């Protein structure tokens, strides 16, 4: 099996991560972004597997891939990581954030209905999280942080409320599901990323950029069990400072016929993969995937 994202260790040191975050605070966004370029160039030069994974994806979405396209892809990841600091500090006057469809989330809040916010590793989820907070919508984030603990320890220090909003995924433990159920029944939103299959034992193989790829399906089982709707929430980053946020209905009610549940789950996974492909084409460098996505389960 090809190495997947769970096996991709956090690169760098805690000192290096803190250095960049201090640079953000003291010198501002422009200086911090400038300092990223030599670091990213070094990384692209000497981390061949990551570079090749980036090129494989970019070739599928744009029809071509070069060294400098991979550099731009990884630089986008670094720039978004830096922007997380500013979003969490509430310092986003330099950002241009456009919201499309946020009324879908607001409508559910007025109705006191909880929902699953189905996202992806596109752009910055902090942008969506901050927008929701400013509109008094409570969003909790279901996440696995095992391979990014240094980054998250620093982010947690910047904004302690962040940790309170994270629900750590512990494979095999029922407590996570019970916590999600409790929040949704209380009318809150629970965000989950739908483009990582490694922690999910329920998978569907669907078409993604013309080739078979595996996507998780447990979130649809969860939605069906809780009779809650799903909203697709996407963030696209456009350099140097623009974030486009999208929120659209995905499923008002997940229906899973007992006689053909597997096919129904695959249909939802295909629906998600098709929408993910759509948004990746809109902003190719926004999808922060740096492992061999298509071969991960082959």
Image (tube, rainbow, N blue to C red):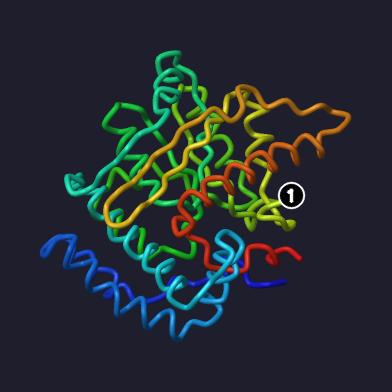
Q: Residue furthest front?
A: 63
Asked if residue 170 shows in the view, the reply is: yes
How many dots with numbers? 1
* Location of residue 65 by image quarter: bottom right
* Location of residue 228 by image quarter: top right
Q: Is residue 51 left or right of residue 157?
A: right
| Above or below 213: residue 106 | above
Task: Locate the C terminus by quadrant.
Answer: bottom right
Residue 95 % position (x, y)? 23, 47
Answer few, some or many: residues within 10 Å of disc 1's Cα (few below 14, many 20 plus, some between 14 and 19).
many
Residue 172 % position (x, y)? 65, 50
Asked if residue 6 shows in the view, the reply is: no
Q: Nearer the viewer, residue 3 or 207?
A: 207
The residue indicated by pointer 1 is 206
Q: Nearer the viewer, residue 98 or 233?
A: 98
Residue 280 % position (x, y)? 52, 51
| Above or below 79: residue 132 | above
Q: Residue furthest left?
A: 26
Query: Residue drawn 28% across and 60% down?
Result: 82
Query: Residue drawn 40% across and 68% down?
Result: 72
Task: Locate the N terminus by quadrant.
Answer: bottom right
Query: Residue drawn 45% across and 86% down?
Result: 46
Q: SS at mark 1?
A: strand
Q: Nearer the viewer, residue 223 or 50?
A: 50
Q: Residue furthest right?
A: 259
Q: Is residue 202 left or right of residue 115?
A: right
* Location of residue 53 by image quarter: bottom right
Query: Residue drawn 44% across and 66% down?
Result: 73
Q: Is residue 141 left or right of residue 4?
A: left
Residue 232 % position (x, y)? 52, 35
């Amino acid at each position: 099996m090809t190495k997947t994202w769970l096996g991709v260790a956090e690169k760098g040191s805690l000192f290096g991560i803190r250095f960049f975050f201090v640079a953000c605070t003291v010198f501002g966004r422009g200086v911090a972004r400038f300092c990223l370029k030599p670091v990213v160039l070094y990384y692209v030069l000497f981390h061949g597997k990551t570079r090749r994974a980036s090129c494989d994806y970019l070739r599928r979405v744009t029809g071509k891939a070069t060294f400098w396209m991979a550099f731009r892809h990884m630089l986008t990841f670094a720039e978004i990581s830096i922007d997380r600091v500013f979003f969490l500090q509430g310092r986003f006057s330099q950002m241009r954030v456009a919201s499309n469809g946020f009324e879908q989330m607001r409508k559910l809040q007025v109705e006191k209905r909880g929902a699953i916010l189905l996202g992806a590793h596109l752009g910055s989820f902090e942008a969506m999280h901050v927008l929701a907070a400013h509109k008094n919508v409570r969003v909790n984030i279901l996440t696995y942080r095992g391979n990014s603990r240094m980054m998250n320890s620093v982010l947690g220090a910047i904004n302690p409320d962040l940790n309170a909003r994270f629900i750590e995924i512990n494979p095999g433990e029922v407590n996570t599901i019970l916590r999600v159920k409790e929040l949704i029944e209380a009318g809150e939103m629970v965000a989950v990323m739908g483009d990582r299959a490694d922690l999910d034992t329920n998978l569907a193989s669907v078409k993604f950029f013309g080739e078979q790829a595996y996507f998780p399906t447990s979130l649809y089982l969860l939605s069906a069990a809780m009779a809650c709707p799903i909203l697709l929430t996407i963030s696209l980053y456009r350099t140097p400072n623009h974030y486009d946020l999208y929120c659209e209905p995905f499923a008002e009610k997940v229906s899973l016929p007992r006689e053909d549940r597997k096919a129904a789950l695959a249909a939802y996974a295909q629906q998600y993969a098709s929408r993910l492909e759509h948004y990746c084409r809109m902003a190719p460098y926004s999808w922060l995937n740096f492992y061999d996505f298509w071969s991960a389960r082959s």
